[in-house]
Image (cartoon, rainbow, N blue to C red):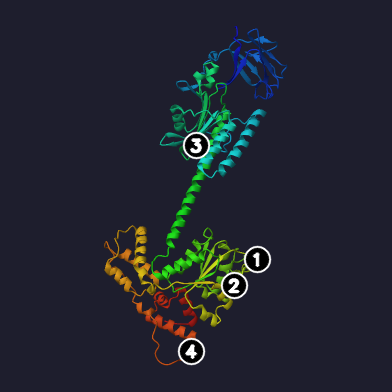
Amino acid sequence: MAGTGKAFLVIRRHDGLGNVFALHGGKRYVLGRAKTNEIVLNDDLCSRQHAEVSSSGGRWRVRDLDSLNGTRVNDKPLEREIELEPLDEISLGRSRLVFVEDLAQLPPLPSGQEEESPGVAIKKRMGQTRYDMSATLTDDSPQPVVVRNRISQDLSLLYRLALNMGSAATFEELVQVVLSGLLEATPADTAAVLSVRDRQLKVVAYQSKSPAETYVQLSDFISKEVLTTREGILAEDVGRLRKGDEADADDGAVSCLICAPVLIGDRVEAMLHIYCTDPLKTFGSEDLELVVAISKTMAVAMQSLRRQVELLEENQRLKAQVASEVQLVGSSPALEEIKAQVARVAATNATVLIRGESGVGKELVARAIHLGSPRRQGPFVCLNCAALAESLLESELFGHEKGAFTGATQRKIGKFEAAHNGTIFLDEIGEMNPGAQAKLLRVLEGHPYERVGGSEPIRVNVRVVAATNRPLEEAVNAGQFRRDLYFRLQVVEIRVPPLRERSADIPILAEFFLQRLLAETGRKVRGFTPAAMEKMKAYHWPGNVRELRNVVERAVALGSGSTIDASDIWLSSLEAGMRQPTVVGGYEPTTLEEIEKRHIDATLKHTDWNKSQAAAILGIERSTLDRKIKAYDLKK
């Protein structure tokens, strides 16, 4: 058949047609494995220069180049140079190429070919890949060297992509990593990531090798197939392969495509879409397998990003909640002065001593100092020094080594280590035993310390905020508290006044507690009646802000009306107990310890040994009262 000087060699695959090589008259084309050949075949059974195709006198000829495994034409050994006819099949190693002078001469699709939409042929579907640990490989035979090299290259690319995807800080950054990887790994002209919402597709982003190329939308037929089967699809435009007009390579139509779902659970969250517009380029099953593997890796990265966003939002929500819970609520001049002091001292690293009766909110002031300081991102660790026995306090503060004492079955870090780069709040510092006081002083002076039973020096960067409801000066004079530690703690002193000294804050605090409790319980209460508010304003509040909160909580829990009335406000009968007793009679020489013992005993009898009420009257914690009852051997 007379030639026109133009012809094509088309790779024949088991599932259809592959790459198209254009042949131009007057040129010689060497076929083989060598990268310098005009037509390179990735076939380990081919020689480096296996065969040659050339034109002469308007006819195309083929000859073998003394290859190791020989060349066959239409399954007959090629022993000499012969002329080629349209649809002749040239076999080199495992490769088979069909010779045509016009692409319209290509044979029809194999009988097993899926053609489910006019002009579009689905060449292959894939859900699992050889890169999946769970995928079942049906062929255990040794892989050819070229196949092994392709797998090695793809694995290397997948590894780099996985690292880059894992380091992506945003979804947009992840998409760009995936698009660049798809264009690098495949012969695609364009790659796109599509989001899926209610089975509707939206282009998130796309990249093209040609900057001037615009994105060609994915057909409804292919997108529905991917959404339904949840498998990757390799498809070709059959009509385009048969046009045979080289000018069509610039018309922007798609010659072949791969689309793979990004599955999170059972939902298709996105799709990867790559395609070629050059009719001489095509995709193979290896490309489909790689794109499916990339889509699965992207799904894992998307889940990780979502989890990071959820954790960040949760962290911000919790910080906002903590910030709201440590609000210094009120507008009295005394509270405004405390807020001003907190604002000034928070920016420094100075040690702070907070003084005030039990229940006034000393811990809230300490948290406010921490949240306003440069250490706000660090931990805030609390410890009540009166809540632990003397033998355990040192271990709790500084930690212990395994076997340091009976019951120390493993090493434990102390509160100071836990508060590294943050703030530690030591409540009721006046109850600390002398041994712990000595260690605390060394830490405050910047010296290292050792865990109980250990010898390894430990250094920490911690800000100390302490609180007390007792006069430390008396403890210093009595030899119960170290003088040098007292001066080291009292760098900055903040006094929190009792609620009875700032009665203007009572309505504001009551309303604040009411709104928070209503949000927690879901109750429908409009507010306090004027009678209820007057009753609370007239009360002496021996338990301070803590008692006020408890009163409001009790009213919300037990009240049945739409408002909280005076009858719903239950107040303690110990109101007068906090008032200073009048001293009668003459002077009686006695120790402070004896006076304290008598006063505690009298208070317990007054409350009929109700320890919680007695502790509120005395302005100390219940645990402190228990220790003093035991120390003074008081009996009911």
Q: Amino acid at mark 2?
A: Leu
- Dot 4 corresponds to which residue? 590
Q: Amino acid at mark 4?
A: Thr
Q: Are marks 4 and 1 in contact (CB under 8 Å)?
A: no
Q: Is residue 293 left or right of residue 116?
A: right
Label located before the other in sequence (3 or 1): 3
Q: Quadrant of residue 512?
A: bottom left
Q: Is residue 626 above or below residue 44?
A: below
Label located before the other in sequence (1 or 2): 2
- Dot 2 corresponds to which residue? 441
Q: Amino acid at mark 1?
A: Pro
Q: Crowding at label 2, few (<14), some or many (≥20) Cα neighbours within 10 Å?
A: some
Quick check: can you spot residue 607?
no
Counting from the top left corner in percent of width and height, residue 265 is at 47, 40
Counting from the top left corner in percent of width and height, residue 578 is at 39, 78
**Labels 4, 2: front one:** 2
Q: Is residue 608 above or below residue 527?
A: below
* Cα gap from disc 4 to disc 2, whole angstroms: 33 Å
**Labels 3, 4: front one:** 4
Q: Are marks 3 and 4 in contact (CB under 8 Å)?
A: no
Label located before the other in sequence (4 or 2): 2
- Dot 3 corresponds to which residue? 262
**Labels 1, 2: front one:** 2
Q: Amino acid at mark 3?
A: Val
- Dot 1 corresponds to which residue? 457
Quadrant of the snapshot with the N terminus: top right
* Cα gap from disc 3 to disc 4, whole angstroms: 84 Å
Q: Are marks 1 and 2 in contact (CB under 8 Å)?
A: no
